[in-house]
Amino acid sequence: MTARSPPRFASVDALRGLTVAAMLLVNNPGDWGHVYAPLLHAQWHGCTPTDLIFPFFLFVVGVSIALGLVPRIEAGVDRAGLQRAVLVRALRIVALGLLLHLLAWWALDAGHYRPWGVLQRIGVCFLVVGSLALHAQARTQWAVLGALLLGYWALLATGGSEAPSHNLASRIDTALFGPLLYQFDPASGRGHDPEGLVSTLGAVATTLLGLRAGAWLRGGRRDRLWQAGMAALALGAAWALLLPLNKNLWTPSYLLWTGGWALLALAAAHALIDRRGWPAIGRRFGVNAIAAYAGSATMVYLLVAVGWWDAIYRIGFAGWMTPRFGPYVPSLAFALAFVGFWWLLMVAMDRRGWYLKI
């Protein structure tokens, strides 16, 4: 049995697209030594605007599962076939992440190959939450979310120190992957990866929260989005008194704090775009999110490999802007121009009906 494609919410595409645009902005300054503080991640504990970006994207992954996969289940599409599709897509996302890291290893002359990364985490979260959407009822999904929150909290508390490379999550990752982590000190044998295996438990919970939010959105229960968003913010802030907000560890307090903002952002986007007809700014990035993220990363690595990246920044921006405005303005201007370039590409692709799906 087949089913028609479920209707799209322009608000979800717009929120996904703005999140991807923000990723490109914070990942590609002209000069990493001169970046405005809100465009940097917190060094360890804390949460800057930049620390909201990845949770927002994973949250929208969950929302998209609720809007795209669940209607097919209800239409009677074979669950086994859907499970295979979820598995294949997850593996493709992970494989693309591994290929991008292989390219980065070559282009950036990195000291080692790093298996973990953004796309790899997205693929794992998509597989786990997609499978839960297929085989678990709402009550079970909420129970899993609660178990992840409390269980991961207990795991981190058991580990004692929350310091980089000393916490239990980093120690487990180091035992499993050692020198392949993002950061590794051969002298001490300690390492840490911000997208490591253990902290992915928190990321899965963020995606699962998005799944439940998508069910509310699809069911027209808009008030739940506002209420849950405020509750998550309050609980996250309270929990941070016991276990600080920390993106690197994706702590439960960070999960709830960023999830609360994501819930409110989805509620606001739906109210303004879907219901009041505001323009869906960011939609073109949103419908081609993989093309924008993977394509821009490939572009950066290749430009670095041939020696053009620094030259473009120096000649086109820093050389004439720094004497007039200081070093921070050209660095931000370069990042904005990079986003603008990819925005134009996404507009052109959308007008031609070109969409990269994996």
Image (cartoon, helix red, strand yellow):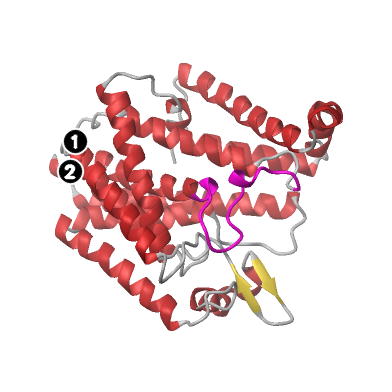
Q: Are marks 1 and 2 in contact (CB under 8 Å)?
A: yes
Q: Is residue 204 visible?
A: no
What residue do we see at 37% from left, 66% from top? 239
Q: Which mark is residue 77?
A: 2
Q: In screen coordinates, is 70 left or right of 299?
A: left
Residue 44 painted magenta: yes
> Residue 26's spot in the image, x, y percent?
61, 42
* First in residue order: circle 1 vs circle 2: 1
Give the vertical position of 182 relative to 310 (above or below).
below
Give the vertical position of 75 relative to 343 (above or below).
below
Which stretch did the figure color magenta? Answer: 33-51
Which of the 4 quarters of the picture holds residue 152? bottom left
Circle 1 sits on which residue? 2
Task: Tell me which amino acid carries mark 1.
Answer: Thr
Q: In screen coordinates, is 308 left or right of 196?
A: right
Q: In screen coordinates, is 230 left or right of 317?
A: left
> Residue 289's spot in the image, x, y percent?
47, 36
Which of the image's four quarters has the C terminus? top left
Residue 221 painted magenta: no
> Residue 139's spot in the image, x, y percent?
15, 59
Label 2: state its secondary structure.
loop
Number of residues whose C-alpha sits closer than 10 Å to that of mark 2, classed few (under 14), some (14–19) or many (20 or more): some
Number of residues whose C-alpha sits closer than 10 Å to that of mark 1, classed few (under 14), some (14–19) or many (20 or more): few
- Whole-angstrom CA distance, mark 1 to mark 2, is 6 Å
- 40 or 128: nearer the eye? 40
What residue do we see at 42% from left, 27% from top? 283
What residue do we see at 61% from left, 25% from top? 340
Which of the image's four quarters has the N terminus? top left
Looking at the magenta stretch, what is its main secondary structure?
loop
